[in-house]
Amino acid sequence: MASSSKTTMAKLTRERALRERRELKQAKKDARRRAAAETRASHSDRDSQQRVVEEEDDGPRSDAG
């Protein structure tokens, strides 16, 4: 009986370690996704602001005549 108890505790320990590793991995994935989303958002904000500036620059010119 004693040997089955050791096996069970070892199995529980392995499973707990595996669960912890998976949680850490998922946390890292989530952090990367958030960082990528923030980067995309900041790039899209910058691009839209840049387009507004370019549109203002492309307006009618008074020296064209």
Image (tube, helix red, strand yellow):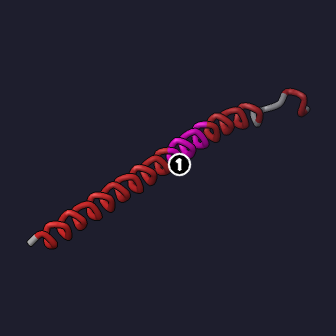
- Measured from the top left, where is residue 50 in percent x and y? 68, 37
Q: Is residue 41 above or below residue 53?
A: below
Q: Residues in magenta?
A: 35-45
The foreground one among 6 and 31 is 6
Q: Nearer the viewer, residue 63 or 28?
A: 28
Residue 62 against residue 27 in the figure, above or below: above
Q: Is residue 45 above or below residue 15?
A: above
- Taking the spot 58% from the left edge, 37% from the top edge, the residue there is 45
Q: Position of residue 12 (x, y in %)?
A: 22, 62
Q: Residue at x 12, y 69 (%)?
A: 2
13 shown above or below 51:
below
Q: Residue furthest left?
A: 1
Residue 22 magenta-drawn?
A: no
Tally the marks: 1
Residue position for label 1: 36
Residue extending furthest front? 2
Q: Give the overall secondary structure of the magenta segment.
A: helix
> Residue at horizontal 76%, vertical 36%?
58
The amino acid type, in three-letter code, at marker 1 is Ala
Q: Nearer the viewer, residue 59 or 32?
A: 32
Judging depth in this view, the residue of 6 and 13 nearest the camera is 6
Say whether residue 19 is left or right of residue 56.
left
Q: Which corner quadrant holds the N terminus? A: bottom left
Q: Quadrant of residue 39?
A: top right
